[in-house]
Amino acid sequence: MESLERRLGYAFHDRSLLSEALNHSSYANEHRGGLRSNERLEFLGDSVLGFVSAEFLFKRYGDLPEGDLTRMRAALVCEQSLYAAAKELGLGVYLKLGRGEEAGGGRERQSILADAVEAVLAAVYLDGGIEAARALIERILLRQIPAVEERRDYKTTLQEVVQRRNGQVLTYHMVDQRGPDHNKTFLFEVRLNDTVIGRGEGHSKKEAEQAAAKDALSSMPA
């Protein structure tokens, strides 16, 4: 337990919470007599994670509409992100699995590890409160924000911004392409009611459109 606490950067007052967070249902089913699986903690951890990540994004991105915030939160708390956090923590080593799940490679299964992360977050929340949970979430998940930002759909965000007013029409136009076929660069403009509001380039048309939308957003009022 101590080695996992060091990895988490948190020392439990009640280690039974952490122990429960590591109990997969297959293990609990094989050990009758009051032993609980981590499923209830997983349920709570999902809500704690959702709240903390939503609050973080709300404060950090004051100019983004609800739809874009929702997409960014989804990218942060998806199973893949939770699995990556579990792997970094080495959480699979500490899981308690039933014999069948153990034999089936459960310690490496993405869904099991992702669920365990949520259970551990709930255990930290119950033991140390929201600030302790927030500190852990920020360290193991919210630091992925730069990567999530790179995956942002700037075209959708721009569309949502301009739709706040009626009669707005966005169009994208390729104005140039250069380079050999295997390494072309495309230059696009985005126009609002035929007025150029952004330009961008990329190695694909989609990438160039996203760059143009990002350029347009950078010059628009919040």
Image (tube, rainbow, N blue to C red):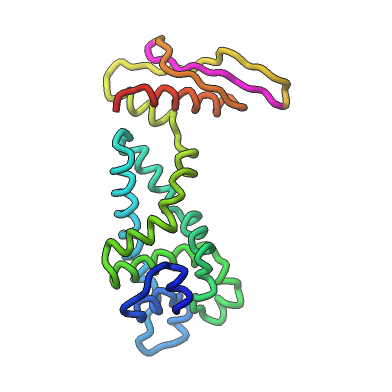
Which quadrant of the rendered structure holds the N terminus?
bottom left
Q: How many marks can you see? A: 0
Question: What residue do we see at 60% from left, 71% from top?
Answer: 105
In the image shown, does 66 or 91 lie closer to the viewer? 91
Horizontal and vertical percent position of residue 173: 51, 15
Question: What residue do we see at 43% from left, 12% from top?
Answer: 196
SS majority, magenta: strand
Horizontal and vertical percent position of residue 32: 41, 88
87, above or below 5, in the image: above
Q: Is residue 182 magenta?
A: no
Question: What residue do we see at 34% from left, 22% from top?
Answer: 220
Question: What residue do we see at 51% from left, 24% from top?
Answer: 209
Q: Where is residue 184, by image quadrant?
A: top right
Q: Where is residue 137, by image quadrant?
A: bottom left
Horizontal and vertical percent position of residue 11: 37, 74
173, above or below 214, in the image: above
84, above or below 189, in the image: below
Horizontal and vertical percent position of residue 50: 33, 54
Residue at the top extreme, as displayed: 194
Is 29 placed left or right of 107 in the picture? left
Which quadrant of the rendered structure holds the C terminus?
top left
**Magenta residues?**
183-193
Residue at the bottom extreme, as displayed: 33
